[in-house]
């Protein structure tokens, strides 16, 4: 696996790969990799000649400096997981490489990016869409892979690619869960042992057949702070805070338990 940190160098490698007529699958991540991320890499491996994964903890999508500072960084373990998953190129840029414009230019969407996650994390999706636009412009992949765990993010990126006539196919990937049902997430590492046990209650409530109002009450009674709970696009989408960790999740309505 090649590790590339400079935008000029990745640009040269992309031109070589494309001149050889080989297809590129791209998986953008913020690192602290877990099997959820690796399922995207596996899909990219199956569909393309060359697999490129980026690790970049994107500062512009954090609306809370503490969250950015404490975001888990596990480069050595990420590197060996990506080697095992037969990644060809790991792109690992510094912030100054991607933001040489100092974030003067942004991709902004309205209204979806102001709702749900966006209502609780102002500016978050400007940061996400801008960094994804930069990465897709640099790497020009045939396909780019995004997890349905971040359902709203997937919708925004899919629509952005269509709006700007990007040639990359935006491929959705199923949400990967822990055995007890908790959605895998890099931030789960910050849960205490006791919080980790309680966290699995969140997807359980999302899947229950209760109304969203009832789900909210049940979660609040169990000590979760509920940011939002909404039914949209045939899914129940939610975000809660447990201790100092914010969890997001969504389940298809067809996965909802039917009443006994
Ligand atoms: P992140 O590193 O959190 O920015 O995530 C990078 C990509 O992995 C995004 O497209 C996420 O939606 C996806 N992802 C993260 N966790 C999961 C999961 N549990 N299942 C499926 N995809 C995931």
Image (spheres, helix red, strand yellow):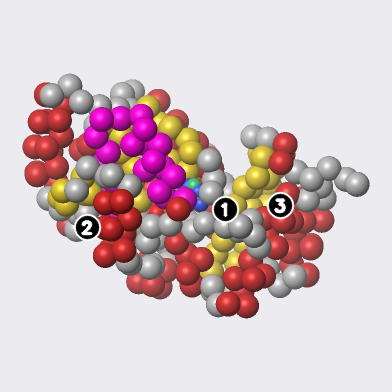
| Residue 115 sits above or below residue 233 on the image | below
179 left or right, relative to 172: right
Counting residues from the start of the chain, the first of labels 1 and 3 encountered is 1
Q: Residue at x 57, y 61 (%)?
A: 247
Counting residues from the start of the chain, the first of labels 2 and 1 encountered is 2
Task: State the SS at label 3.
Answer: helix
Q: Is residue 153 visible?
A: no
Q: Residue at x 83, y 43 (%)?
A: 258
167 left or right, relative to 111: left
The number of callouts visible is 3
Magenta run includes residue 208: no
Residue 56 lies in what quarter of the image? bottom left
Neighbour tally class for label 3: few under 14, some 14-19, many 20 plus, Cα within 10 Å: many
Counting residues from the start of the chain, the first of labels 3 and 2 encountered is 2
Residue under pointer 2: 95
Mark carried by residue 177? 1
Q: Is mark 1 within 8 Å of ligand 1?
A: yes
Q: Is residue 238 visible?
A: yes
Neighbour tally class for label 1: few under 14, some 14-19, many 20 plus, Cα within 10 Å: some
Q: Where does the image place residue 32, in percent across and percent down from the top left?
A: 37, 61
Residue under pointer 3: 206
Magenta run includes residue 39: yes
């Amino acid at each position: 696996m090649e590790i590339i940190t400079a935008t000029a160098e990745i640009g040269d490698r992309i031109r070589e790969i494309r001149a050889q007529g080989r297809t590129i699958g791209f998986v953008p991540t913020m690192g602290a990799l877990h099997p959820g991320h690796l399922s995207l890499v596996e899909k990219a491996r199956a569909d393309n000649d060359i697999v490129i994964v980026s690790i970049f903890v994107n500062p512009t999508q954090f609306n809370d400096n503490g969250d950015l500072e404490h975001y888990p960084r596990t480069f050595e373990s990420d590197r060996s997981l990506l080697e095992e998953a037969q990644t060809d190129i790991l792109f690992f840029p510094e912030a100054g490489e991607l933001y040489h414009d100092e974030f003067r230019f942004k991709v902004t969407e309205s209204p979806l990016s102001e709702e749900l996650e966006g209502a609780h994390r102002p500016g978050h999706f400007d940061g996400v869409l801008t960094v994804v636009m930069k990465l897709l412009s640099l790497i020009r992949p045939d396909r780019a892979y995004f997890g349905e765990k971040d359902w709203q993010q997937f919708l925004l990126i899919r629509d952005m690619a269509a709006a700007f006539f990007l040639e990359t196919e935006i491929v959705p990937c199923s949400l990967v869960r822990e055995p007890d049902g908790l959605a895998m997430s890099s931030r789960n590492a910050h849960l205490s042992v006791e919080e980790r046990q309680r966290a699995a209650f969140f997807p359980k409530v999302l899947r229950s057949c209760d109304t969203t109002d009832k789900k909210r009450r049940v979660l609040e009674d169990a000590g979760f702070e509920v940011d939002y709970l909404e039914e949209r696009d045939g899914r129940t989408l939610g975000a809660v805070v447990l201790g100092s960790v914010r969890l997001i999740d969504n389940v298809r309505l067809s996965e909802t338990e039917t009443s006994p």
